[in-house]
Image (cartoon, rainbow, N blue to C red):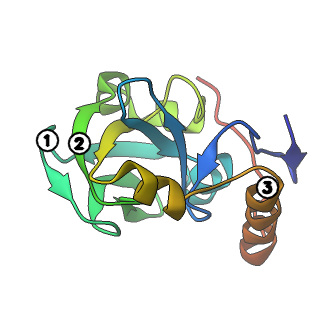
Amino acid sequence: MPEYRGCELPEDLWYDLDYLWARPNDDGTFTLGLTDPAQTMAGRVVSALFRKPGTHRAAGRNLATLESGKWVGGVPAPFDGTIERINPAVAENPGLVNVAPYTDAWLLALRPDDLQGAYARLKRGPEAIEALKAWVDKYGVQCMRCSG
């Protein structure tokens, strides 16, 4: 897995090139989560409030709100869609986001209104990895994980 300034950047995922990674699921949904650089920049997450499953959100509208000791921010939808499910493990233990951002700490599953439109808004492969490296440089991020 590529790593840059301590940040893991899995090549098999899709990215919004800002805060989120996306993994397509067989049921037509995308599992979404915070990237390693984004979780580092947020700091230790102490609260995660999700919109309810069944809620429709337009691209850019918040799907959830995360809070750390130094930041409160929304998790924007990368494309228009409906929340199918949230991760109960993160709802119960928000700090998991800082420990396992690409595995156990996925945030939610979002069903796109338009599958091809969703893919058009996401990037993958070398283009995505280079853009994420530029994001890390822009914000001066040096990734680190919290211990469980």
Image quadrant where one finds the N terminus? top right
- Tell me whether circle 3 and circle 1 mark residues in contact (CB < 8 Å): no
Residue behind mark 2: 83
Residue behind mark 1: 52
Question: Does label 2 or label 1 sit earlier along the sequence?
Answer: 1
Residue 29 x/y as whole percent: 36, 35
Numbered disc 3: secondary structure: helix
The kind of residue on which mark 3 rests is Ile
Neighbour tally class for label 2: few under 14, some 14-19, many 20 plus, Cα within 10 Å: many
Numbered disc 2: secondary structure: strand
Tell me what residue is drawn at x 76 percent, y 45 percent: 9
Viewer-side label of 3, 1: 3
Q: Outermost residue, bottom direction?
A: 138
The kind of residue on which mark 2 rests is Ile
Taking depth in this image into account, of 51 and 119 the one nearest to the observer is 119
- Tell me whether circle 2 and circle 1 mark residues in contact (CB < 8 Å): yes
Neighbour tally class for label 3: few under 14, some 14-19, many 20 plus, Cα within 10 Å: many
Tell me what residue is drawn at x 87 percent, y 54 percent: 5
Taking depth in this image into account, of 35 and 111 the one nearest to the observer is 111
Tell me what residue is drawn at x 37 percent, y 54 percent: 67
Residue behind mark 3: 129
Taking depth in this image into account, of 73 and 62 the one nearest to the observer is 62
Question: Does label 3 or label 1 sit earlier along the sequence?
Answer: 1
Image quadrant where one finds the C terminus? top right
Q: Kindly report the distance in space between the C-alpha atoms of the residues bearing marks 2 and 3.
A: 27 Å
Residue 66 x/y as whole percent: 36, 52
Tell me what residue is drawn at x 44 percent, y 64 percent: 71
Residue 3 x/y as whole percent: 86, 44
